[in-house]
Each structure stands twice: as structure tokens, then as C-alpha cells.
Amino acid sequence: MLFVPWKYIADWKCKACGLCCKAYSVVLNFQEWLKIVNNYGVDKTVSGLNKLFIKRRSDGSCIFLYNLSNTHICGLQHMKPKACKLWPFKILSRPDFGYAEEAAYDFGEKTFFIYADSTCKGLTYGRPAWEFVNQTLKEFIEISLGLRSEQFKTTADIPFLQPYAGFRILSIRRDYF
């Protein structure tokens, strides 16, 4: 995968295509794992040698990914893991993927280096738009630092779900039947 510095990106909007939920395993911190286990059961997660993950279906997709009329919906929207909230962006304290000047982003008194995973279909390349620079990237950094948990610019805007602000898809545990 190729990581692109943010200064080459005009804008980003989630297309709800589900690619990220199909192509990548989601690493969970302990608190995220505990929330999922308490709400859905331990069988919705798996463990590696030193990491915890969300379980994947046989087709490789996240077990909480739902397809609703070709729009992919996260069943964990109400408790989405940080790794999911930050994708496709990497917010780093060092320019690990090069192009330091193009990746540098000042936030407060600190400089971060922001890159995007080029496989994301929501990226629009070009000169960064004001809203992208001052609202979207700022929100990604605030989520990364734990200063906010709500998402406005950093998630899909799905119009047909807007009337249902508290909407969440719950998985049904088979052992109830």
C-alpha cells in the first residue's frame, strides 16, 4: 500500500464502500475489546499472539459490516474502534513514510505527519480545500489524541439514516435461538 501526504489531497469523504472493512483486520485496544465482548460476546473477536482483533467473516470482511442497498454500514458505529475512526489516515509524530514537508500538519504547538492510504476511494487528489484542512484533518487529529470521540467529518454521511440519529445495527447472537 502507498501512503500519500495530506498536502496532495484536496478532500476526503467516506463513500461507505466497505473496502476498509473488507481489506484490513481491526486491531482493538483492551477497552474496545471489552465493550465489544460485553455487548456482543467474545465470539465476535479473535486474539493473536499479542493483539486483539474484530472477527472476520469467511469472505474476509468485518463481522460488523452490513450491506444495505450497496451502502456499507458499520454495526459498531456507536462504539467504533479508533483504528476504524482514523482510516484511511495515519497521524504520526514522525514522517515515517517520507515527504516530511508535505505531510507536516501543525496542531496546537505540535507538528504531526499525516498520510492517507491511497487505496481509499474517498480521496480526491489536488490542492487541499479549506474545509478538509481546517475541519476534517483537525477532527482526525482530535480523535487520534483522544480529545473527541464523535465523528462528523470523519465518517460517511448517509442521508437515509439521518432521521434515525440513534440508529445502530445489532448483531443477533445465534445461541439465543
Image: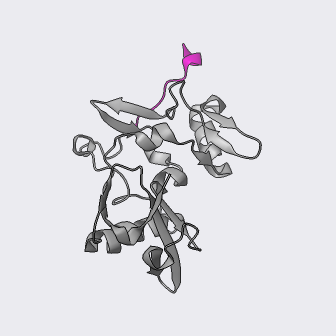
The image shows residue 148, relative to residue 122, as above or below, that is: below
The colour scheme of the drawn protein is: one colour
Q: Is residue 174 magenta?
A: yes
Most frequent secondary structure within the magenta stretch: loop
Residue 13 versus residue 109 in the image, above or below: above
Give residue 161's position: percent from left, percent from top.
Answer: 27, 41
Q: Which quarter of the rendering shows the C terminus?
A: top right
Q: Residue at horizontal 49%, vertical 24%?
A: 172
Residue visible at 58% across and 40% down?
Answer: 36
Left/right of residue 73 with respect to residue 174 in the rendered view: left
Q: Where is residue 160 in the image (x, y as percent from the top left)?
A: 22, 40
Seen from the viewer's position, the closer of residues 14 and 73 is 14
- Side of 105 relative to 146 (left or right): left
Q: Total of numbered circles in the picture?
A: 0
| Residue range highlighted in magenta | 168-177
Say above or below: 64 vs 112.
Answer: above
Of 173 and 51, the residue lying toward us: 51
Could you tell me which residue is drawn at 34 percent across and 40 percent down? 17
Outermost residue, bottom direction? 109
x%, y% of residue 23? 49, 40
Asked if residue 72 lies in the magenta stretch, the reply is no
Image spot of residue 34 (x, y percent): 65, 44
Question: Looking at the image, which residue sits at the far top?
Answer: 177
* Farthest residue, direction right: 49
- Residue at 49% across / 50% down in the picture? 84
